[in-house]
Amino acid sequence: MGRARRATVVLARAAVCAAAGCGGSPSPEPQESPGGVVDVLGLWSGPELDAFLTVEGRWEDATGHRLDWHGAQDVARDLARRLDAGDPPDVAVLPNPGLLHDLADDGALLPLEPVVGADRLARDYPATGVPPETYPDVVSRRLADTLVSAPTVRFGAGDAMPSVVQRAWWQAMLAYAEDPRTLDARLALLTTTAAAAR
């Protein structure tokens, strides 16, 4: 993808909170969406899509906005076509961290803050000891049946993840984006780090 291509690509977890202010414009600036329609491109099917559509239906009922889901067998290809056509989706559910890395390198990502608002980000992403410009709860797909995410379940309900674990987890995800073969060893390290932090 060339640097001239731009997209409003927001991570899947942000779709629900960002949808009220998203727009499908070739400009990198967030735009108001007429009628409150959020255009989402992703790979999900079967039970994953059913679960997403259940949440999406509740969100539509609660907000009065509408979500247009566009399933794709090859998200990278379909996203590239839409970027080339000047019609990027409001939200792209990316199938792997490598594509996220490529889009970031191409300058095709937009920060959430201008779309969602700093107050909402502060409320929905409470202080975790991580700088406000980084959010370590990005969910990345490693295999078709496996999700890789921050290991918050290892800590008691309401307990914050120790910052040493956050930093180690984030470094593991960055390394995985560079070379997926590094993740298994790093996850073993994280398990040890998490146990030691308890």
Image: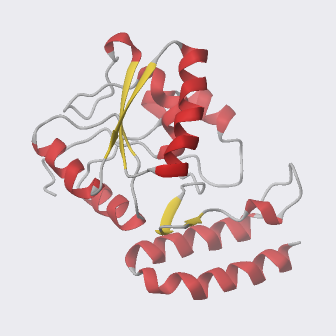
Judging depth in this view, the residue of 47 and 183 nearest the camera is 47
Residue 9 vs 106, above or below: the answer is above
Q: Quadrant of residue 83?
A: top left
Residue at (27, 57) in percent of width and height: 74
Q: Can you say which quadrant of the picture contains the C terminus?
A: bottom right
Q: Quadrant of residue 179?
A: bottom left
The type of colouring in the image is: secondary structure
Residue 72 vs 38, above or below: the answer is below
* x and y, in percent, of residue 166 in the image: 67, 65
Judging depth in this view, the residue of 55 and 184 nearest the camera is 55
Residue 187 vs 124, above or below: the answer is below
Whether residue 44 sits left or right of residue 193 in the image: it is left
Residue 13 vs 1, above or below: the answer is above
Residue at (11, 45) in percent of width and height: 84
* x and y, in percent, of residue 43 in the image: 38, 52
* x and y, in percent, of residue 54 in the image: 58, 33
Residue at (84, 74) in percent of width and height: 197
- Total numbered badges shown on the rendered structure: 0
Q: Can you say which quadrant of the picture contains the N terminus?
A: bottom left
Judging depth in this view, the residue of 168 and 185 nearest the camera is 185
Whether residue 127 sits left or right of residue 4 in the image: it is right
Whether residue 65 sits left or right of residue 71 in the image: it is right
* x and y, in percent, of residue 46 in the image: 49, 50
Residue most extreme to the front: 46
